[in-house]
Amino acid sequence: MKKILVIAIILFTTSEIYAQLELGAFGGWLWTGSVPAWAQDIKVSDKGNFGITAGYQFNDEMLVNFEWNHTENSATFREYLVGGGLGDVINVPLTFNYYMLGFNYLVSSSESLVPYGLVNLGVLNATSNSQNPAYQDSNNWFTAGLGGGLRYYISDNIGIKLQARLLLPMQFGGVGFGCGIGTGGGGCGAGVSTYTNIIQGDFTGGIVLKLGS
């Protein structure tokens, strides 16, 4: 009898957890800007992005999810000459991978149309893929995001969503994105404060699948 009771409790708990899980996939466009560097600004291209999410809805208002967000970009800047000054224009391919937790505040989860606000915290991995070893590097930065969107459920388990967001890769103690693509120490800031030296934004659309009934 005790074994049956334990099994029943486990099955009930598992089903309750499963009912709150959701999976998602999305695609869209990532806007970037220029990175301040020594004697110049480095232009990072705007490109398409895509990714997946896995989330758990704790209650009617709070959904927490994990997100992987990928994009292939490039950085364009002038080469630094040994004797000083700037040389030829260099274009370095970049790969951005965001790994973030998202805290979603759902305005109403009982209706088909659900507005929501979003705060993200996570890590950005930026890798430069140049054939020149001088411009090959990989760095990680703490990242914050702030945005919002709309979900529309076409059934109890399937929905679509539109989302707009600002992404803020941070640098600590002056170790900045400019150094990460081989532009030299002159491109890095100084000090011990935490700040962002590139602001990105993305606009995405996707599909949401609730696993529970």
Image: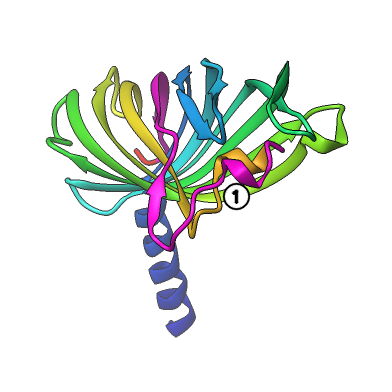
Residue 33: image location, x then y, percent: 45, 23
Q: Which residues are magenta?
A: 182-211
Q: Is residue 118 above or below residue 140?
A: above
Which amino acid does the dot numbered 1 rest on?
Asn
Q: What residue sits 37% from the left and 41% below the top?
A: 212
Residue 133: image location, x then y, percent: 86, 36
Q: What residue sits 87% from the left and 27% below the top?
A: 131
Q: Residue furthest front?
A: 83
Q: Is residue 148 left or right of residue 91?
A: left
Residue linked to disc 1: 140
Q: Is residue 207 magenta?
A: yes
Residue 95: image location, x then y, percent: 66, 30
Quadrant of the frame with the C terminus: top left
Question: Of 24 and 90, which appears nearest the observer?
Answer: 90
Q: Is residue 185 magenta?
A: yes
Question: Of 213 and 195, which appears nearest the observer?
Answer: 195
State the SS at label 1.
strand
| Residue 2 image-quadrant placement | bottom left
Q: Is residue 93 above or below residue 199?
A: above
| Residue 125 image-quadrant placement | top right
Residue 158: image location, x then y, percent: 36, 24
Quadrant of the frame with the N terminus: bottom left
Question: Of 147 and 139, which appears nearest the observer?
Answer: 139
**According to the image, what is the colour scheme of the structure?**
rainbow
Q: What residue sits 44% from the left and 77% below the top?
A: 6
Q: Categorize mark 1 by other alpha carbons within 10 Å: few (<14), some (14-19), many (20+).
A: some
